[in-house]
């Protein structure tokens, strides 16, 4: 999503959001991510206003004090920025891809099923299976930090079974234009 | 007496319940502090996929030699190969090396262009008495034109703006004849005007009549 993103041309506007909308965003984030209210409070205090930055293609980025924290496409699920995910790795479930796929991921490619099911990859076990359309943290084999944030296109059971085609769509990755933006 | 006995019994129960709830709820989890490479802004373990591995390694060795050992020592390199077969690993390394060379060449070309590019300060006559000064070419030196224009405007107490010249490129137009002062500002690296060698600046005078000074 942020393969080519230039703040000078792709941002339509900055607006502070109404507190009622902020409250609903906070509630959604608490339900979608594995985060405690206190931790969310530390990242985004209740007193602080959220600024809504509108970008092209209905992408909205929410920032606190200029630092982007959350973004969403249309009215879809909320994703944390990769920097936020690095600070709090537990907020999203993890999938891992093997080493050969890393360089393609870093160029913005989506994750194909074989990369997730091969020896270097990792998918959550059947009892913690993720349905399609869940935001996940993409980790890389042998690496400690997440390399991207994605959304599952198939459920983890289907990925294991079908093993063809796109498994996880890459939403943002290390080194894309959103990563380069430290403040908005 | 009876009361005391009664009140003490239920007491421990609620306080216990409160205690059990309070500690887990009250503490936010502290963030993991991640070190990012000074050269490529990735976490150091991903530097090998960036375009500047040699520089990254140097930087890491200087700044955080313990991490350098962790990532680039012999055993670490062995375990990193991981599940990739030998040919795949060799191919990966070759591709990365090629990418790095290309990125270096690009960076050098950009730097050379920067050195060769000129800043042109034009003094244009608006009417017989009035002049405007146009500064062209600051973009090549990574200067934010809007901020520079604002700086000029506040320094000279006059209007300054960024506009497109007939070639379609951006230039800063300052009203009044301030070309010499701007030259001085550039030489002294005032404010935001940093990193411009003095010989790249040229002063030009033009007599063309602009329709309306913007």
Image (cartoon, coloured by chain):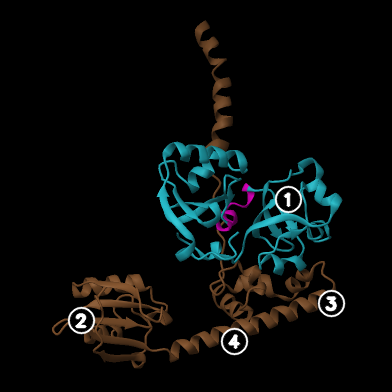
Answer left or right for A54 relative to B128: right
Dot in front, 2 or 1: 2
Q: Judge whether B160 appears above or below B186 on screen.
A: above
How far separated are the C-alphas under marks 3 and 1?
31 Å
How far separated are the C-alphas under marks 2 and 1?
62 Å
Q: Which chain carries label 2?
A: B
User: For mark 4, what is the residue?
Assistant: B105
Q: Which chain carries label 4?
A: B
Q: Residues within 10 Å of mark 2 (few under 14, many from 20)?
A: many
- Earlier sequence position, callout 3 versus callout 4: 3
Are the residues at dot 3 and dot 1 in contact (C-beta closer than 8 Å)?
A: no
Instruction: For chain B, give the colour.
Output: brown
The residue most toward the left is B129
Location of residue A183 (image quadrant): bottom left
For image coordinates 77% across by 46% down, the residue present is A155
Q: Is residue A108 visible in the rendered structure shown here? A: yes
Q: Give the range drawn in magenta.
A: A82-91
Whether labels 2 and 3 share one chain = yes
How far separated are the C-alphas under marks 2 and 3?
69 Å
Q: Is residue B1 visible in the rendered structure shown here? A: no
Label 2 element class: loop
Whether labels 4 and 1 share one chain = no
């Amino acid at each position: 999503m942020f393969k080519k993103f230039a703040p000078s041309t792709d941002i339509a506007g900055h607006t502070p959001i109404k507190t009622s909308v902020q409250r609903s965003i906070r509630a959604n984030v608490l339900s979608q991510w594995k985060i405690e209210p206190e931790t969310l409070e530390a990242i985004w205090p209740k007193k602080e206003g959220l600024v809504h930055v509108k970008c092209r293609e209905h992408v909205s980025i929410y920032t606190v004090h200029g630092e982007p924290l959350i973004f969403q496409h249309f009215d879809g699920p909320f994703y944390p920025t990769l920097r936020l995910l690095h600070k709090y790795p537990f907020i999203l479930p993890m999938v891992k891809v093997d080493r050969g796929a890393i360089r393609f991921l870093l160029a913005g490619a989506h994750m194909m099923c074989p990369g997730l099911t091969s020896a270097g990859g990792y998918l959550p076990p059947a009892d913690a299976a993720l349905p399609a359309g869940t935001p996940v943290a993409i980790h890389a084999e042998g690496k400690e930090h997440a390399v991207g944030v994605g959304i599952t296109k198939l459920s983890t059971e289907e990925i294991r079974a079908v093993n063809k085609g796109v498994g996880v769509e890459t939403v943002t990755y290390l080194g894309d234009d959103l990563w380069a933006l430290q403040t908005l | 007496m009876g009361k005391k006995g009664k009140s003490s019994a239920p007491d421990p129960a609620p306080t216990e319940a409160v205690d059990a709830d309070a500690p887990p709820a009250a503490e936010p989890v502290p963030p993991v502090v991640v070190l990012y490479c000074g050269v490529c802004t990735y976490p150091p373990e991903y530097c090998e996929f960036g375009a500047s591995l040699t520089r990254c390694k140097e930087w890491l060795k200087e700044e955080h030699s313990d991490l350098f050992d962790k990532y680039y020592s012999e055993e670490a390199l062995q375990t990193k190969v991981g599940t990739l077969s030998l040919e795949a690993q060799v191919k990966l390394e070759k591709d990365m090396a090629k990418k790095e060379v290309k990125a270096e060449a690009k960076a050098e070309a950009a730097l050379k262009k920067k050195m060769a590019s000129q800043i042109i300060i034009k003094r244009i006559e608006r009417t017989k008495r009035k002049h405007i000064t146009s500064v062209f070419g600051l973009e090549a030196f990574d200067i934010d034109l809007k901020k520079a224009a604002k700086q000029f405007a506040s320094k000279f107490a006059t209007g300054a703006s960024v506009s497109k010249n007939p070639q379609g490129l951006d230039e800063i137009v300052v009203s009044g004849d301030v070309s010499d002062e701007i030259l001085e500002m550039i030489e002294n690296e005032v404010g935001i005007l940093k990193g411009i060698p003095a010989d790249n600046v040229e002063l030009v005078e033009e007599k063309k009549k602009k329709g309306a000074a913007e």
